């Protein structure tokens, strides 16, 4: 790489290099930026830093990670694209949006996949690393020039940037510095605060030594100056800095902070994508509040460990994703049968089987509700924003201990890595689990003294004198004695089921987004909330009578939903899981498989609820939802 | 007598337990089942060490052996097949103050729960596990287990089992962090009791394999060993098992074995005839996982709050004081 020929400026560097200092700055309400590189070149770090700087300026942001499934996919490959989408807005941003306005690519291959997937707006600005034009390998040169020409012909505004060449002036291995150079370029283009950008470098590399910070600051400046001197466009996305302190974190960090804030002591887990980063962060910090993360030998052991810890002390939590969730089913059934509180976090990914480990999906709803053999009622709640990830865990822990139930928290890969600012929570002691009971048990008390109305029974914790009993996964009576009598079996089933009804009685009807009545009601759950509500806003602006309703509780379901649905002509769920397309040749009303929530709601309300789903391994876009709704309304 | 002294006496009275204090439901095991001997030894152990019943938990999986907690009058956790160990580990991690015992069988431990067995030994948490090894599945009516001798005819191996038996002692002694391995037989209750007591007193994970009879499905299997005391090799040592004079007269096939000697322990583990009985290995120096993991910090609300706020600080964007974000030049 020291060959000077290779370092010669590419012949067509910065095609429109006439850019000047007095380039007008165009105001935008929002923009979508993508940064793409080979795995290991730091595009993700660049994207996250960009988002943090914008968030600190008071912009609404949402980030979507673009992740290859492998650790070291081949360089310059379509499948190896790694990076980040950052959507920045003047107001709050609740999802990754539609197509990108500007894409930075470290090579043309990583860009191709995104182009083919129609992730770029027509006429999108592309900032492309130009070094490949003079690569030693003629094949690379040919591929690069062909791609470049095609992109230009397709109407994209392609700017070639000599990233490698510029960075080499500052560092010996530009592969490791380009990302901060690009950050500088982007900060200049989007008129982001220069000081905040420098600050961000110090934060990003805070754990490294001063020299690293200095080098990366130099790269940032170089990028900034290069853009200043060479680019002929500039934007600003005006923002009002928030008046309240904001947290800027992703969903998995929010879940982990929720675990901290819930007062739980023990998290047992086994590594699985995309849930593991919850445990990474928790492993780092849980001990600072006196908790601990146990990495078990397998998913089953993690669940059983959490059950043991819950049984003998405070409610515990286990964190997993689809395949791990399947493995835990028998143990979850045990916790249900023995009425041991436990929180199970499932950060959903594409399934079945190994499926799409790094991609989000909402395919586990029915497993979460009906999983484990026999009748195993458990509570299922879904998170729909980053903020929600934090509070959902606190709520889950409370419900688990109040009702002695398993509470499943469904998040997904989209929330896991998505970043969104939200108001810094105000600590409340009521979040924390109370100390477990060690008082004497009064004579005559039974370990399953089910309340005939609510099914609730007080839990006996080891250490409580006179509470000795043997808990069992076998059918049992109120004394926890194994019992096969038909009456006792039904009594147990009935009381375990009643607890769901008891919880349901405490729930409020969900809010309706938009008007209370109209032509179409969209019902959603989980991470699609932002996209659905943005679609509803757009459709309403077009004059369509569309509203939406987003469910936090999936089991039990909030009251009053049927009544809400009846105020609309049509009801349709929007979900990221499978449903048969009614237009397929052999699909008809008798054999069509509806999406998970639609199936549940149809059964519960007897309303003819339709569904629209997409399982493309990427977040559902507001524009896609809007298009689906327009089509539905034309039916 | 002062009030304090009265209380003290009352406490003494309270803390002194009888065998009945540990006797739960009436065992439903077959007459002559080795599980009965283990249960009796456990009840004696609890009484003689004055274990508070409310501070004691017997954890089990599924199988004949795993019914044991129902017959104790302590806390019990009769869970699911193979998973007694991770449940027990969760209990011990949450509550190091509890006495935790595990009853498991050769199917429960060596087959469906084998992964947990290996890792349970490695965690070395301070608890006692008894492997009730009767070489056969009993509750599901006679199927070959991993410890069935080769050629055993069972409902799933009608022409005889195909594989050599797994040796639980050798496996356990091959695992990093192993700290206590012993073997007993159900038909010598006094030695069984002594070994379980040593296991209970060992600080760390104590693995005790008890070879036991299944009168229903393998009624004659251990007859030669019952009839001939010479076929039992008793391991004795001042740091290990010490036989009473009466027992020493009967079990004359004795060998001095230092439980710190791992190499010899592994050799002994591979002997199946005579059956070695005693403490094969004991190393009190292995750290316990729960000790490594617990900070010992009292979790007050203020403590949690301070930790949480510190984390929030890392991710907080503070509002500018009266300052609008400056548009870049």
Image (cartoon, coloured by chain):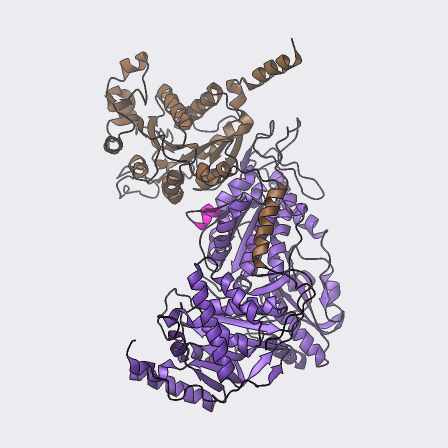
On the image, the x and y values in percent for residue A65 come to: 50, 68
Query: Is residue A531 in view?
Result: yes
Above or below B48: residue A417: below
Above or below A45: residue B4: above
The quarter of the rendered structure image containing the C terminus of chain A is bottom right
Residue A254 relative to residue A608: left or right? left
Task: Give the residue displayed 49% in from the left and 44% down from the top.
Answer: A304
Verify whether residue A301 appears in magenta. Answer: yes
In this rendered view, identify the residue nearer to me: A437 or A553.
Answer: A437
In this rendered view, identify the residue nearer to me: A98 or A614.
Answer: A98
- Furthest residue in direction bottom, as rendered: A153
Which lettered chain is shown in purple?
A
Above or below A315: residue B312: below
In this rendered view, identify the residue nearer to me: A630 or A319.
Answer: A319
On the image, the x and y values in percent for residue A233 come to: 55, 84
On the image, the x and y values in percent for residue A219 come to: 45, 71
Which lettered chain is shown in brown?
B
Q: Quadrant of residue B44?
A: top left
Report the span colored magenta: A293-302
Q: Quadrant of residue B264?
A: top left
Query: Is residue A375 in view?
Result: no
Verify whether residue A395 appears in magenta. Answer: no
In this rendered view, identify the residue nearer to me: A294 or A558.
Answer: A294
The quarter of the rendered structure image containing the N terminus of chain A is bottom left
Q: Quadrant of residue A516?
A: bottom right
């Amino acid at each position: 790489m020291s060959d000077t020929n290779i370092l010669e400026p590419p012949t067509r560097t910065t095609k429109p290099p006439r850019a000047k200092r007095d380039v007008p700055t165009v105001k935008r309400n929002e923009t979508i930026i993508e940064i793409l590189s080979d795995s290991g070149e730091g595009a993700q770090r660049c994207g996250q830093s960009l988002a943090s700087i914008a968030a600190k300026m008071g912009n609404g942001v949402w980030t979507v990670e673009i992740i290859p499934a492998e650790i070291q996919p081949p360089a310059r490959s379509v499948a190896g694209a790694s990076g980040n989408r950052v959507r920045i807005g003047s107001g709050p941003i609740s999802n990754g949006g539609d197509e990108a306005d500007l894409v930075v690519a470290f090579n043309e291959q990583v860009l191709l996949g995104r182009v083919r997937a129609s992730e770029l707006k027509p006429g999108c600005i592309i900032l492309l690393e130009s070094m490949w034009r003079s690569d030693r390998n003629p094949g690379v040169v040919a591929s690069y020039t062909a791609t470049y020409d095609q992109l230009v012909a397709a109407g994209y505004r392609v700017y070639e940037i000599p990233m490698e060449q510029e960075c080499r002036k500052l560092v010996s291995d530009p592969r490791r510095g380009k990302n901060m150079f690009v950050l500088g370029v982007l900060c200049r283009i989007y008129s982001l605060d220069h000081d905040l950008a420098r600050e961000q470098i110090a934060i990003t590399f805070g754990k490294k030594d001063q020299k690293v910070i200095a080098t990366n600051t130099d790269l940032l400046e170089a990028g900034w100056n290069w853009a200043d001197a060479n680019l002929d466009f500039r934007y600003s996305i005006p923002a009002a800095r928030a008046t309240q302190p904001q947290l800027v974190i992703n969903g998995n960090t929010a879940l982990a902070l929720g675990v901290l804030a819930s007062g739980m002591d023990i998290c047992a887990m086994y590594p699985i994508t995309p849930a593991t980063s919850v445990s990474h962060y928790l492993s780092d910090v849980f001990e600072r509040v006196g908790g601990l993360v146990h990495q078990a030998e397998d998913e089953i052991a993690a669940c059983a460990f959490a059950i043991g810890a819950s049984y003998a002390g405070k409610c515990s939590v286990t964190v997993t994703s689809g395949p791990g969730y399947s493995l835990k089913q028998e143990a979850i059934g045990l916790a249900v049968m023995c009425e041991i509180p436990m929180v199970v976090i499932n950060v959903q990914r594409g399934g079945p089987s190994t499926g799409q480990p790094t991609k989000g999906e909402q395919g586990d709803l029915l497993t979460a509700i009906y999983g484990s053999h026999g009748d195993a009622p458990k509570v299922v709640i879904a998170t729909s924003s980053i903020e929600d990830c934090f509070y959902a865990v606190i709520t889950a822990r409370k419900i688990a201990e109040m009702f002695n139930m398993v509470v499943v928290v469904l998040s997904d890969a989209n929330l896991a890595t998505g970043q969104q600012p939200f108001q810094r929570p105000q600590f409340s002691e009521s979040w924390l689990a109370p100390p477990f009971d060690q008082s004497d048990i009064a004579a005559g008390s039974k370990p399953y003294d089910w309340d005939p109305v609510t099914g609730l029974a007080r839990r006996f914790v080891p250490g409580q004198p006179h509470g000795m009993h043997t808990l069992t996964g076998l059918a049992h009576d109120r004394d926890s004695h194994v019992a096969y009598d038909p009456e006792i079996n039904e009594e147990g089933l009935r009381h375990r089921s009643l607890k769901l009804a008891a919880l349901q009685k405490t729930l409020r009807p969900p809010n309706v987004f938009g008007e209370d009545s109209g032509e179409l009601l969209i019902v959603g759950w989980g991470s699609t909330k932002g996209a659905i509500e943005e679609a509803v806003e757009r459709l309403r602006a077009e004059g369509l009578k569309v509203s939406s309703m987003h469910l936090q509780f999936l089991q039990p379901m909030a009251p009053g939903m049927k009544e809400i649905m009846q105020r609309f002509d049509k009801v349709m769920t929007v979900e990221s899981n499978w449903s048969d397309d009614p237009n397929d040749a052999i699909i008809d009303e008798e054999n069509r498989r509806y999406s998970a929530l639609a199936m549940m709601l149809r059964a519960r309300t007897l309303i003819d609820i339709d569904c629209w789903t997409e399982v493309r391994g990427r977040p559902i876009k507001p524009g896609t939802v809007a298009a689906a709704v327009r089509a539905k309304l034309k039916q | 007598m002062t009030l304090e002294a009265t209380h003290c006496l009352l406490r003494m009275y309270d803390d002194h337990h009888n065998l009945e204090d540990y006797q739960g439901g009436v065992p439903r095991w077959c007459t002559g089942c080795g599980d009965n001997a283990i249960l009796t030894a456990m009840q004696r152990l609890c009484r003689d060490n004055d274990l508070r019943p409310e501070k004691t938990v017997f954890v089990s999986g599924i199988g004949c052996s795993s019914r044991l907690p129902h017959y104790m009058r302590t806390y019990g956790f009769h869970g699911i097949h193979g998973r007694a160990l991770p449940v027990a580990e969760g209990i011990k991690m949450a509550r190091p103050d509890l006495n935790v015992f595990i009853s498991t069988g050769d199917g429960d431990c060596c087959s469906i729960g084998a992964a947990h067995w290996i890792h349970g030994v490695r965690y070395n948490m301070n608890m006692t596990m008894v492997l009730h090894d009767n070489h056969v599945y009993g509750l599901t009516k006679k199927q070959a287990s991993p410890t069935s001798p080769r050629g055993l005819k069972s409902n799933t191996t009608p022409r005889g089992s195909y594989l050599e038996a797994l040796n639980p002692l050798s496996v356990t002694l091959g695992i990093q962090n192993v700290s206590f391995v012993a073997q007993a037989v159900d038909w010598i209750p006094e030695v069984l009791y002594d070994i379980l007591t040593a296991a209970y007193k060992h600080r760390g994970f104590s693995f005790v394999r008890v070879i036991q009879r299944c009168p229903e499905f393998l009624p004659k299997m251990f007859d030669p060993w019952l009839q001939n005391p010479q076929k039992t090799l008793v391991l004795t040592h001042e740091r290990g098992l010490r036989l009473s004079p009466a027992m020493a007269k009967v079990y004359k096939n004795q060998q001095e074995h230092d439980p710190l000697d791992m190499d010899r322990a592994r050799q002994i583990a591979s002997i199946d005839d005579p059956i070695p009985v005693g403490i094969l290995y004991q190393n009190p120096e292995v750290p316990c996982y729960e000790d490594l993991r617990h900070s010992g910090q009292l979790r007050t609300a203020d403590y949690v709050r301070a930790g949480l706020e510190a984390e929030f600080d890392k991710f907080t964007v503070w509002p500018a004081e009266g300052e609008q974000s400056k548009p870049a030049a």
